[in-house]
Amino acid sequence: MSVGSFPAYGGGLESPDEGPQELTGREIGMITRSFQCHLATVTPSGWPYVQYRSGPPGFLHHLGGSRIGFPDFRGNRQFVSAGNIDDDARVSLFLADYPRKQRLKLFGRASVIEAHDDEALMSRLRWVADGEIASPSERAVVIEVEAFDWNCSRSLVPQYTAEQVCERVQPYIDQIGDLQREIEKLKGQLLQ
């Protein structure tokens, strides 16, 4: 008996692996507009380890083909993910675009590149649409994506950043201001 998501997603498991999936514009768009993700690595004892990563929108870069990368910012000085990648290159990234109710899982093999070993890559990864990222980066994580999966959006609750909320409500705030000025003008005309 087939239960859960197997009928929808597992039907092709009996066929041989056809090789890595190619990233399309849809995946690249989701990757490059993200400002946060969860990175899962595998510990030397085989346990999963998940770490939150974030930066300005676009901190995840498409490097061509099925390669993506991001700068590893100086932060809490935890090097667990980097150590795990050195031991076992298999990783997964979980990206969610909450306003659009979209989820993307990426699976691949990662490498950690120290800043002094590839200054050109580090320079490229420090640039986003708004300019250069100010936070120091000590290394880069580059992932060769082998597979991806778009998750069902049904249970994803829309969430918005403060900037997104301001952008959506600003027209109403402007309209309220205009109406208040109009009311004051009409009150002034009534009192004349």
Image (cartoon, helix red, strand yellow):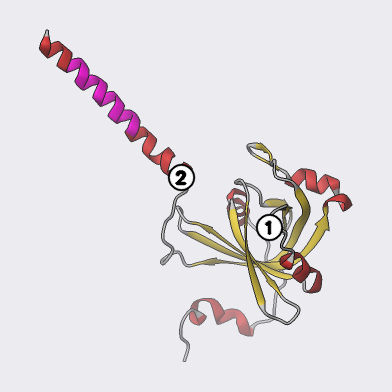
Q: Is 166 placed left or right of 182 in the picture? A: right
Which of marks 1 and 2 precedes in the sequence?
Answer: 1
Picture coordinates of residue 134 (x, y %)? 70, 40
Residue positioned most to the bottom: 1
In terms of depth relative to the viewer, which is nearer, 118 or 138? 138
Picture layout, residue 10 above or below residue 165 = below
Question: Label 2 vs label 1: CA separation?
Answer: 24 Å
Q: Amino acid at mark 1?
A: Asn
Corner quadrant of residue 72: bottom right
Q: Is 11 placed left or right of 119 in the picture? A: left
Q: Which residue is mark 2?
A: 162
Picture layout, residue 126 above or below residue 188 = below
In terms of depth relative to the viewer, which is nearer, 51 or 8? 51
Picture coordinates of residue 152 (x, y %)? 47, 67
Q: Which residue is mark 1?
A: 76
Picture coordinates of residue 190 (x, y %)? 11, 13
Do residues under tags 2 and 1 come within 8 Å of each other at their CB atoms?
no
Q: Amino acid at mark 2?
A: Ala
Residue for point 23% across, 20% down = 182
Q: Which residues are magenta?
A: 173-186
Q: How many numbered marks appear?
A: 2
Picture coordinates of residue 121 (x, y %)? 81, 48
Residue for point 51% across, 81% down = 6
Q: Residues within 10 Å of mark 2 (few under 14, many from 20)?
A: few
Picture layout, residue 143 above or below residue 29 = below
